[in-house]
Amino acid sequence: MASLGISVDGNKLDVSSRKFTYGGTIIDSGTIITRLPQVVYSALSDAIRQSMTNYTLLEDVDELLDTCYHLEGNEPFVLLEIKFHFGEESTIDVTLSNSGTIWKKRDTVNCLAFAATESYTNSNSIIGIVQQRGFNVLYDLEGGRIGFGRSCAS
């Protein structure tokens, strides 16, 4: 199942599905945050930044995370809905939980828990464990399929 797209607040990013899937998509519980090809990450970061003008965007908070916001005086922190779109013939939409989109850097700093791949030549998308929060992920290796279901609170 190939990743075909991402939506922010119901608006699909204007990025070709080939940009998501050219190098493949890996779902990896050993990678903390999701890594996207540069062009995809830039579109996501731009969409988030355009919608978060009520919050103070911080510079140089983290070498990897470049979309971070100062929260003091702006609580609660509300990030727009981010949704992954998977599939080839029929699309499966997976809406990320708030805890699946935010990396809490400090008490008053939250960052978008996504980053660009390390190089322009590495075009794999890697869906990290933060984005898997709140989901059970089922792998059907023989059938070549994957499934997502909301996990039950214990």
Image (spheres, rainbow, N blue to C red):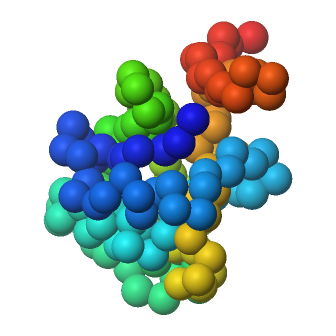
> At x 69% / y 45%, what residue is drawn?
27
Q: Position of residue 100 (x, y in %)?
A: 54, 42
Q: Position of residue 105 (x, y in %)?
A: 59, 65
Residue 134 visible? The answer is: yes
Left or right: 55 as drawn, with respect to 146: left
Q: In the displayed structure, would residue 142 be above or below residue 121? A: above
Left or right: 105 as drawn, with respect to 137: left
> At x 78% / y 46%, what residue is drawn?
29
The residue lying toward the viewer, choosing from 79 and 6, is 6
> At x 49% / y 44%, what residue is drawn?
3
The residue lying toward the viewer, choosing from 24 and 98, is 24
Give the residue at the far bottom of this rendering. 60
Q: Position of residue 73 (x, y in %)?
A: 30, 59
The residue lying toward the viewer, choosing from 69 and 34, is 34
Left or right: 9 as drawn, with respect to 115: left
Q: In the displayed structure, would residue 120 be above or below residue 144? A: below
On the rendered image, what quadrant is the N terminus found in? top right
- The answer to which quarter of the image holds residue 123 is bottom right
Residue 104 visible? The answer is: no
